Amino acid sequence: MKKVLITGAAGFLGSHLCDRFIKEGHFVIGMDNFITGDKKNLQHLKSNPNFEFIEHDVTQFVKIEGELDYILHFASPASPIDYLKIPIQTLKVGSLGTHNLLGLAKAKNARILIASTSEVYGDPLVHPQTEDYYGNVNTIGPRGVYDEAKRFQESITMAYHRFHGLETRIVRIFNTYGPRMRLNDGRVIPAFMGQALRGEDLTVFGDGSQTRSFCYVDDEVEGIYRLLLSDYNKPVNIGNPHEITIRYFAEEIIKLTGTKQKVIYKKLPIDDPMQRQPDISLAKKVLNWEPKIGREEGMKKTFEYFKSLSKKQLYKSEHKDFSNYINK
Ligand code: NAD
Ligand code: UDP
């Protein structure tokens, strides 16, 4: 049994990772300050003897008693609208937070895995994106707060690896979806599904010709788990390479949900990447990993989850007016 610290545990990916590590027989300490997370995501683990929760902001010194084998640093706002709304916290959790967790890993002689992102490639000029592409990020644009925090995170992680010999892993996560995403976090899947459930038109940004490639959460978690246990210390893309346009995706959601509503078009947010598709050759080679769950199956499961939420959650409108944030 290993002792594992997972930051961002009350979030979407963090809570699924807690489940996976507990299922594998490990002891998990979840840590979160709930800035974009939800206590409900961990409710089912409350009385599990192999789970402990610490409410804490990781940009402050992180103290853990006793030994620690693994750290997975997943704390960070992840939705464009979240990180545009809380830009300074986003920069701090990627920089100061990561520094604290690397320091903790060094003190405990633990292996640490850092959640990076396809956003390190910015609006990519290389397609599909391979790990050796350096990216095309606007440092001073509104999304820069997230992209640059994550790029710094990768650099400081490699520095700890090279200078201190720390065991580090870096996963570059591409758009991942599934149950426990926040219905109103502004990301495209909860946005479209929430709109369908409320009987609103689906808002496509720009002309919808931009592309994304969506990975179901169980596949993503499997890739992350394998990467942690591997001996590969450079960044690895984990995502589903099946690429579609957002306009086509909106039509798919209309069919899946059976909504009578239509697509309407809104302004494209500044620096919204026009194309995104992971090249997963490296993950196939070093982790023997590739996604298994197709979009149709994954979207059905996700829609079932959103349908099961209460009316109160459905009509909670955290990000109704986000134009202030995305176009400044
Ligand atoms: P999420 O918003 O659901 O979860 C993030 C969690 O981190 C939340 O519970 C939040 O409260 C917590 N958090 C934020 N700042 C914190 C702080 N200072 N101290 C403690 N806790 C803090 O987002 P998610 O989709 O689960 O993303 C998790 C991680 O994966 C993030 O690092 C994100 O950048 C990365 N990622 C996710 C995706 C994706 O498609 N879901 C893609 C690329 C990268
Ligand atoms: N998007 C959209 N309508 C919405 C929300 C998002 O058309 O209501 C678009 C957004 O402009 C982007 C894509 O969907 O091109 C994916 O956006 P998301 O916020 O999920 O994450 P991103 O991949 O940009 O980080």
Image (cartoon, rainbow, N blue to C red):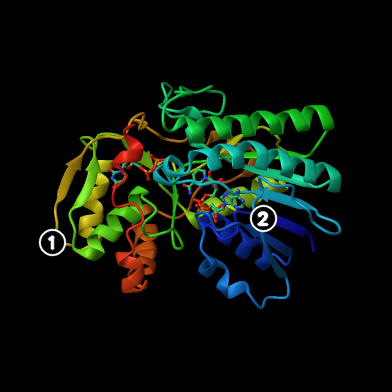
- x, y percent for residue 167: 78, 39
Circle 1 packing at 10 Å, graded few (<14), some (14-19), many (20+), is: few
- Relative placement, left or right, of 162 versus 213 is right
Residue 279 in sight from this viewpoint:
no
Question: Height in image: 4 above or below 172?
Answer: below
Reply above or below: 137 against 287: above
User: Residue at left 53%, top 38%?
Assistant: 88
Residue tagged 2: 6
User: Which residue is nearer to you in this view: 51 or 63?
Assistant: 63
* Residue sitting at x 31%, y 35%: 269
Q: CA distance from mark 1 to mark 2?
A: 41 Å
Q: Secondary structure at mark 1?
A: loop
Indicate which quadrant contains ligand 2: top left
Quadrant showing the C terminus: top left
Q: In the figure, residue 301 lies in which quadrant?
A: bottom left
| Residue denoted by label 1 | 260
